Image: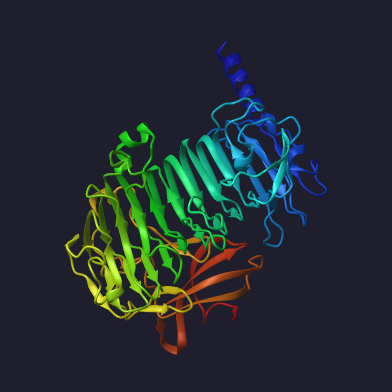
Amino acid sequence: MMKSVAVLSVLLLATCCTLAETYHVGPGKKYLNIGDAPLVSLKGGDSVLIFYRDEPYREKWVITAQGSASNPVVFHGVSSDGKLPVIDGQDAINPSGMNFWSEGRGVIKIGGSNNPPDVMPSHIIIENLEIKNGSAPFSFTGRNGKTSWDKNAAAIFLEKGENITIRNCVLHSCGNGFFSAHQSRTVTVEYCYLFGNGNSGSIYEHNNYTESFGITFQFNRFGPLREGAEGNNLKDRSTGSVIRYNWIESGNRQLDLVDSDNEEFIRSSNYKSTFVYGNILIEPDGAGNSQVIHYGGDSGERDRYRKGTLYLYNNTIISTRSGNTTLLRLSSTDESADVRNNIIFVSTTGSHLGIVDRDGMVELRSNWIKSDWQVSHTNASAAVSVLDTTFEGNTPGFADLTGQNFNLTTGSICVNRAAILADACLAEHQVRFEYLKHQNKKERTVAQSLDIGALECTGLSIVDRKVMHAITGQGSYTIRTTYFSKKPASVYTFRNEFILNGRHVKSTPFNAAASNVILYK
């Protein structure tokens, strides 16, 4: 009897494993269009492979499938010569038989539908897609015929869902790039490029606008919004927000971390701790608000504000404004910021740099700050405490400020100067990686102790090159070559960060003089 049960279990497991389907969409595939695949019946383990074609896929759809950690539901774009498949909201069409509300809110919508049945989506991965044009003046064809996009439409609208991953997508030319509502939990946005979103003359739409119970942004590139748009780059109302190893450039503010109106979020202990580390934040001249980061709330209902601590550490923060720059706006006296190990640089004189706007408490530890910096431009008695050495000067020792190479040279005062992290950061939020241009990462290699800023000093110079490796099968890579030391007879020891099709492949040390390698500038 036990043998029969065991055999039955094996058969059931085998049957279960064979139930997962992979649907191929694109030229020459079984399904010419995305909507031709059975999207309404997707289940755990199913994958929809969307192959690149020259003509965009002018389609939109909802995802309500339920996967698991071991068997997620995956929408995967298959690139061609580095070009991602394009999902275009201009003249997009809903798949036949699919019926869902809030059609005008997202080119791809997760959660909330009549058909497929309305369930809580889980373990969904959307990756390797370019999604655009969910925005006026464009329209789509849905259940009510031709319909205009909502002003706040997003490339991806996450109405509800758990364990959702958005990876290596390009989200642009929409009202919002990525939008999540409060019924979303455990969300990861990584290796994405968000730019050109928002609406001209409006402060209400952003490259990113999220409110999730647990959200992590990592290895993303956030570029300027649509011309004339007045929104923020990354606006977030979540609890348990982690923003690490990103490149965030321009926007009304680079980060707008404000309050939720959801009681579960406000009661959560994670609501009071926000972690921002390893990022490169760039404030260009004339890009809206002079404040780089806003933390606390914007509703005016102060009992909803975050009332906790912003842990801001090991970031490189650059402002090229010709006028004043303020690092932080804390919304009330109940908000505080632990600011340590950051490079805070302005291209003008240091007197144009203020640490905080008016309220809240800021503690500074082991930061490099432009000489002659000010506590505040608006409140000379603001609560800013210097609890460890502040390193000052005219430049922190960037490799190439004009070329936006913010790596440190070996002579930088920031090398080996970082303070120990706050206790709250040590368990899960130590600095382990660096942002690698663009939408990539590398391990952060520490020679002695951690450097100040987002990027560790790696040696004599850093260059991008093309390499043709002599070993059969290695092929052509774009690499970032980091020289660690110069040895006799012009022999260099260096580490190569191999980038293939835009993704990090591996890191290897090898000897240039002893290896059969041809380097091309």
- Residue at horizontal 77%, vertical 37%? 36
- Residue at horizontal 71%, vertical 50%? 90
Q: How many marks?
A: 0
* Residue 306 x %, y %: 31, 44
* Residue 116 x %, y %: 65, 28
- Which of the 4 image quadrants contains residue 433? bottom left
In the foreground, 68 or 217: 217
Vertical position of residue 90 compared to residue 47: above or below:
below
Quadrant assignment for the N terminus: top right
Q: Residue furthest bottom?
A: 489
Vertical position of residue 72 compared to residue 86: above or below:
above
Q: Residue furthest top?
A: 1
In-image side of 364 versus 86 (left or right): left
* Residue 425 x %, y %: 29, 51
Q: How is the image coloured?
A: rainbow
- Residue at horizontal 67%, vertical 51%? 137
Q: Residue furthest front?
A: 201
In the foreground, 14 or 196: 196
- Residue at horizontal 45%, vertical 81%? 492
- Which of the 4 image quadrants contains residue 414? bottom left
In the foreground, 338 or 408: 338
* Residue 104 x %, y %: 63, 40
